[in-house]
């Protein structure tokens, strides 16, 4: 038993080393770089983020590398979060962005706001922060962001599911990814969400993709939860009364579920228009 315990600790040690070796931390000319931070994993992320760690863990957090760059009294902090896949990286990134930010060509998408530069690429979410107002320091932070972008491996494409959302009426840079409990229901997971305006109506569209079998299971659970008899069909469309979310327009086909929330009961024509365009 003692040998097994020792061996387990050795494996943990090797795994931490492996996780720390796959990230390259660039130098920044004129700044002193400090990289003596621990590599944060799922079991100690709380030490760094406190209560905010919960959200990161919900989005498939794998590890975090931290570095600081100092020049006089000016400090630039770099955080490189690795998540389980591209959807998760986009998901955590989308929870912290705003349509009012200045968007830049960095990674798959990035923005600059008041000394913060955040972007995601592949399965990585990068955050750079300085409290300095000095223009040269701010430019150095941007330079660092581009250096990190060049070093990180991963596709610069946005998650493919985002292309399914119709452009008409869609609010720009407000798409999100919800990993768990979509609309507060545990049986609805892995949904991309976009917000829309149509006339005086403001509503949201959710697109859930899974296997056909899992799609049918989720649909059946939702129908049961709203007092509707489940149906065994690969294609369907319902208007439901959801006690927590009001009127819901639900449609599914093959491996996709579409949910529209926020439309009034007499707006079935609007719902049908968007559902048809997504399924075309």
Image (spheres, helix red, strand yellow):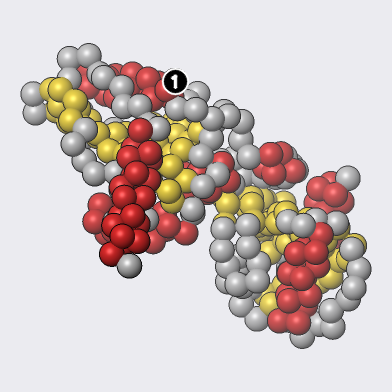
- What percent of the width, then of the height, locates residue 69? 20, 27
Q: Find residue 236 and report its image quarter.
A: bottom right
Seen in the image, is 154 located left or right of residue 67? Answer: right
- Residue 134 visible here: no
The secondary structure type at the circle numbered 1 is helix
Does 178 appear above or below 74?
below
Q: Quick one: 93 or 97, which is closer to the camera?
A: 93
- What percent of the width, then of the height, locates residue 155? 58, 29
Q: Which residue is mark 1?
A: 150
What residue is at 45 percent from the left and 27 percent from the top? 152
What residue is at 77 percent from the left and 85 percent from the top? 227
Locate the N terminus by quadrant: bottom left
What residue is at 58 percent from the left and 52 percent from the top? 177
- What percent of the width, then of the height, locates residue 256? 78, 56
Q: How many labels were placed on the picture?
A: 1
Locate the C terminus by quadrant: top right
Furthest toward the bottom, the residue is 227
What residue is at 33 percent from the left and 18 percent from the top? 143
């Amino acid at each position: 038993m003692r040998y097994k315990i020792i061996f387990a600790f050795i494996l943990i040690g090797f795994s931490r080393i492996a996780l720390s070796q796959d990230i390259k931390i660039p130098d920044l000319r004129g700044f002193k770089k400090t990289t003596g931070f621990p590599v944060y994993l799922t079991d100690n992320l709380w030490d760094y983020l406190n209560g905010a760690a919960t959200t990161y863990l919900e989005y498939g957090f794998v590890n975090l590398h931290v570095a600081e760059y100092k020049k006089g009294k000016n400090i630039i902090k770099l955080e490189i979060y690795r998540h389980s896949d591209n959807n998760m990286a986009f998901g955590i990134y989308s929870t912290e962005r705003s349509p009012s930010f200045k968007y830049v060509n960095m990674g798959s998408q990035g923005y600059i706001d008041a000394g913060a530069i955040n972007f995601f690429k592949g399965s990585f979410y990068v955050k750079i922060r300085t409290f300095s107002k000095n223009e040269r320091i701010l430019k150095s932070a941007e330079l660092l962001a581009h250096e990190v972008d060049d070093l990180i491996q991963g596709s610069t494409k946005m998650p493919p599911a985002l292309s399914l959302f119709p452009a008409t009426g869609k609010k720009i840079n407000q798409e999100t990814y919800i990993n768990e409990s979509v609309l507060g229901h545990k049986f609805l997971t892995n949904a991309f969400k976009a917000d829309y305006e149509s006339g005086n109506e403001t509503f949201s569209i959710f697109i859930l993709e899974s296997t056909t079998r899992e799609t049918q299971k989720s649909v059946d659970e939702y129908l049961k939860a709203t007092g509707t008899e489940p149906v065994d069909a690969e294609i369907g469309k319902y208007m439901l009364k959801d006690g927590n979310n009001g009127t819901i327009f639900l449609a599914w086909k093959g491996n996709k579920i579409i949910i529209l929330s926020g439309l009034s009961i007499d707006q079935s024509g609007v719902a049908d228009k968007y559902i048809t365009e997504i399924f075309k």
